[in-house]
Image (spheres, helix red, strand yellow):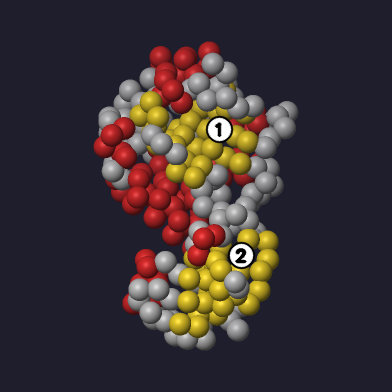
Amino acid sequence: MESGVHMQRFFISPEHFQSGQVLFPADISHQITRVLRLQTGDSVVVLDNQGHEFDVEVTQVNAKGCLGTILAERIALGEPSVQIHLLVAVTQREKFEWILQKCTEVGVTSITPLLTERSLVGKAVELGKKGERWERIIREAAEQSRRGRIPQLRDAMLFQQAVKTQGAVRLLAWEGEEQRDLRQVLIGNEICDVYVLIGPEGGFSMQEAQQAEALGWKPFSMGKRIMRMETAAVVACALILFHMGEI
C-alpha cells in the first residue's frame, strides 16, 4: 500500500462511515473518478474532522458514489497545541482567498471575515454568498497541508462586534504601535488560545485601534517594513506558532 505521506487526503463527515466502510459523497467521488482517476484497489486517507484519520482502500469506483474499506485508523496529527483565531479584514477576492488558503496551511483554528471602516467590501450579506466557496478553499488547503482538522470559517463580523470577543490573549496588528512587537506581547502569557486582528489595506483607523485597546486588545508592531495585509496575516500567525515551538 502507498505510504500515507503521499496518499490523497479527504475530509468526510462521520455519517459517511458505516460498518468499516466509507461511502464517498458525490463531490469527492467525482474528484476520485474524473480528476484523480483512481482505480479499485488504490488507497487514500480519509479524515473525520474529529481527530481521526483512516487508511481506506477504494473498492468501488462510481462518479455518483465511490465506496472504500477502512484498513487502519489512527489519531490525526498536524494540529498545533495553540489555537489561533484569526479575525481578518475582507479584501479583494483573490487576496482574501489567498489568506484563507495560506493561513490554513500555517495552522490557524478559525477565520472570521472582518468588516472595518476601511474594508473594501462593506456588506455582510454579500459575504454570505461566498461562504461555500471559501469553505471549499479552506478544506482543500487543510487536505493538502496534512491538517488533522478543518479550520472553522465563522460568520462575518463588524469590527465593533469583533472587539467584544472574549479571550485571554487578544492581539491587534497595528502600524501605529511603535513600542511592542509580537514577541513582547506574547512573553509572560500562558497561551492556549490567541485571537489576532488584522486590518485592511489602509490599516485600522485610530478610533478602531483605541476602541480595541480600551477593551483589552494588545496592539503590536509588525516591524519597520510595511507589509501587505495578506502578508501580515500569514506572518503574524506563523510568528505566534514559531514562538510556541510549533514551527
Q: Position of residue 169 (x, y in %)?
A: 62, 28
Location of the N terminus by quadrant is bottom right
Q: Position of residue 109 (x, y in %)?
A: 55, 44
Q: Position of residue 157 (x, y in %)?
A: 40, 29
The answer to whether residue 43 is seen in the rendering is: no
Q: Is residue 223 above or below residue 33?
A: above
Instruction: From the viewer's side, name the closer residue of 226 and 52.
Output: 52
The structure residue drawn at horizontal position 66% and vertical position 69%, both measured from the top left corner, is 73
Q: Is residue 118 above or below residue 88?
A: above
Residue ID for mark 1: 195
Residue ID for mark 2: 53
The structure residue drawn at horizontal position 27% and vertical position 30%, both measured from the top left corner, is 122
Instruction: From the viewer's side, name the closer residue of 124 and 229.
Output: 124
Instruction: From the viewer's side, name the closer residue of 242 and 109.
Output: 109
Q: Does 176 sit left or right of 189 as displayed?
A: left
The structure residue drawn at horizontal position 31% and vertical position 39%, both measured from the top left corner, is 127
Q: Is residue 196 above or below residue 109?
A: above
* Kind of residue at disc 1: Tyr
* Kind of residue at disc 2: Glu
Q: Which mark is residue 131?
A: none
10 Å crowding of disc 2: few (<14), some (14-19), many (20+): many
Distance between mark 1 and mark 2 Cα atoms: 28 Å
Mark closer to the observer (1, 2): 2
